[in-house]
Amino acid sequence: MSLVSLKELMPEAKKKHYAIGQFNINNFQWAEATLRVAEREKSPVILASTDRIVDYLGGFKLIATTTKKMVEEMGITVPVVLHLDHGLSVERCIEAVDAGYSSVMYDGSKLPLEENIANTKEVVDYAKKQNVSVEAEIGSVGGTEDGITSGIKYADPKECYQLVEETGVDLLAAALGSVHGIYQGEPKLAFDLMQEISTNLNIIPLALHGGSGIPSHQIVKAIEYGHAKINVNTECNQAWTKAVRKYLELHPDSHNIPEIMQTGMSAIERVVAEKIHLFGTSNKAL
Ligand code: 13P
């Protein structure tokens, strides 16, 4: 199956109260492990590269071509979205669209609202012509991602409605207390705001960033209150490093690379399977 955009998947997910997992890739083994689980679970899935990791992975074209080839060679039949996470500029989003990504996020959350809207609209106008979906961000997700640290700033509902209405985005990452990376104590998601914003956005779903480390009951509530996409990166990376570290401690003289790497991939697979079950997407690709 070729890559699909979130336009095809989001409305059904919001209506039926499940959330499609976005799993960030840190190399192509992350993609392979994630695809294997999605296929086994008959679950739609989102593979994402953050803008800051694109060059390390070989550039937009290499990522898009390799992902498509993996989907084909692995005989993947479930819907797969290739998404640019936190696109840093309009130009970078356009580059991703041109390279074959099926979805992009433009992150103008640090800009004044009017500028965020103008840039997001430019991305939407370009992406729409290629049937590529667009996610926007408003407010500030806290924590650290790709070495950049930010504080939490809760999204303002009125700004959310204005941004969605004036840009025509397919989904909105409204910052509501989540953080990228590791939480200090219990996450404090603003469920009242979440419910209000989601209800007023009608069919447009919310995207939850910082999906690692949020207790299951809060995830279930966030899905109930309109999140149809949940991003996971840290938990896969923690699982990979823990498993590989343990293997190397037990086998200090080993240089059996396939065995070392497979240990890490199996750990990622366990996290992805757990998230797919929690987010309710098993058998949703049928
Ligand atoms: P975590 O690393 O906290 O899982 O967040 C992932 C994310 O939101 C990517 O944009």
Image (spheres, helix red, strand yellow):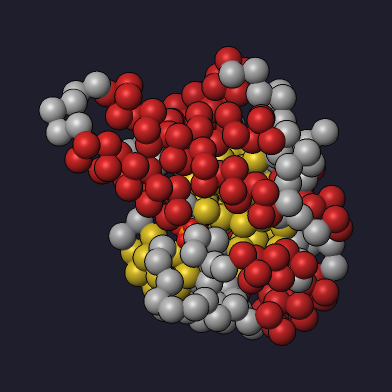
**Figure check: 232 above or below 32:** below
**Figure check: 196 above or below 44:** below
Residue found 38% across the figure and 36% down from its top: 264
Quadrant for the C terminus in the image: top right
Residue found 45% across the figure and 64% down from its top: 180
Closer to the camera in the image, 246 or 78: 246
Closer to the camera in the image, 181 or 175: 181
Image quadrant in which you'd find residue 69: top right
Q: Residue furthest top?
A: 73
Q: Residue furthest left?
A: 253
Quadrant for the N terminus in the image: top right
On the question of residue 186 being in view, the answer is yes
Closer to the camera in the image, 143 or 118: 143
87 relative position to 253: left or right:
right
Residue 152, how many percent across, how many down?
Answer: 47, 79
Residue found 45% across the figure and 54% down from its top: 235
Residue 215, how many percent across, how many down?
Answer: 57, 68
266 relative position to 117: left or right:
left
Closer to the camera in the image, 279 or 177: 279
**Figure check: 244 above or below 153:** above
- Report how many numbered discs are placed on residues in the image: 0
254 relative position to 40: left or right:
left
**Figure check: 146 above or below 96:** below
Residue 32, how many percent across, how many down?
Answer: 50, 29
On the question of residue 48 being in view, the answer is no
Residue found 54% across the figure and 36% down from its top: 34
